[in-house]
Image (spheres, rainbow, N blue to C red):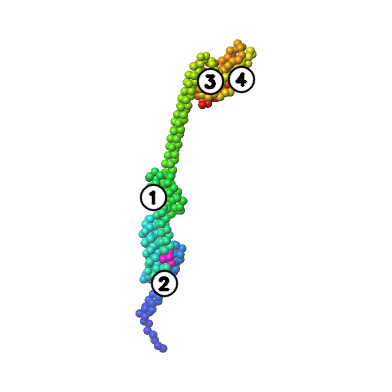
Amino acid sequence: MEKYIFNWKTALLIGALLFIGGCSTKSNAIYQDSIQKGLDAIAEDNFSKAEGLFEMATEAKEKDQKAKALLNQVQLILKSDDLVTQNKIDEALKSLEQSIEVEEGSKVVASKARDKKEALLKYQESQTAYNTLLTDAKNLTQSGDYQKANGKLDELLKADLSQFASIKDEATKLKESNNTIIRNAEIAQAQKNAQAQKVAQTQKVAQAQKDAQAKVAAAEKEAKKDIQPNTLSADDVVIHYSIWENGELELLSQSIILKVGQRLVLTRDDHNKISERTMFSSDGIIDTFQNTNGFIAIAPGTTDISILPGDDWERSKVINVTVIN
């Protein structure tokens, strides 16, 4: 029988090789799993998760260029997202461009970076357009053209500003301020117009009174020329009335229209001894004229003349008088 001599060195070497082979197999499995799950996370746009998985892949294979390239691409995308939150759009675009151009990087990740870049360019274009509208509105407001400024703001606020909260907030506040100024100006103008109308009305009334007084003065002057005060003229209006023995008052007309300066003469036709009183309101519309049994129209308006037989109010009659120009 042959005898074999056990060699410890040989055994240790074999064991070491087996251990290294086992570790290598485990590392390779971690690497492959991390890469695949990282790419799955990229497909779901979960770049933070993908970053962690690609870091595990680089730890499993420290010298692997593919894992490093993937990790670099993802980190540049995450950096871009962070720069966007700081409103550093130009720097964010540069970071995305670097992600697209990483050597040995993934075309899938590069495509994601490219999509983000296009979206960011559109965002930047919209931001520029919206800021231009806002600036134009501010300039118009400063120049006092609030209506045109609000036109610019209306155009701006109709846009989708879900990504531009600060622009929307500023535009809304500016429009509210402009509306307040416009309303105050309208109120002030309305008050000014009302005051102007009041002044015009006052002047119109004053002129009407002046004209009426002039007509009255002319009429009185003309009346004084008469030899007999009770002499009637062609323009005079005569109302006949009678008071019967039983105190009943008969009035032939109870409603008349006079022109300013025209006279109204009351003529009693009976010869009964019952006395009467004639009363009217001293409202400046009519007045008695000198030494005559009647009245003269002074100013436009309406008034009443009451004839009272004796002291019997129940038998009194009223003449409604309307005076026009």
Dot 1: element: helix
On the image, numbered disc 4 is attached to which residue? 252
Q: Residue at x 38, y 58 (%)?
A: 89
Q: Which residues are magenta?
A: 108-112
Q: Which dot, 1 or 3, sits closer to the camera?
A: 3
Of residues 224 and 279, which is closer to you in this image? 224
On the image, numbered disc 3 is attached to which residue? 263
Residue 79 at what x, y percent from top left?
Answer: 38, 60
- Whichever of labels 4 and 2 marks the residue nearer the N terminus, that label is 2
Residue 138 at what x, y percent from top left?
Answer: 39, 47
Q: Residue at x 46, y 63 (%)?
A: 44
From this viewpoint, is residue 278 visible? yes
Badge 1: residue crowd in 10 Å (few <14, some 14–19, many ≥20): some
On the image, numbered disc 1 is attached to which residue? 135
Query: Could you tell me the amino acid type at mark 4?
Result: Leu
Residue 269 at what x, y percent from top left?
Answer: 60, 15
- Distance, label 3 to label 4, CA atoms, is 17 Å
Badge 3: residue crowd in 10 Å (few <14, some 14–19, many ≥20): many
Query: Could you tell me the amino acid type at mark 1?
Result: Thr
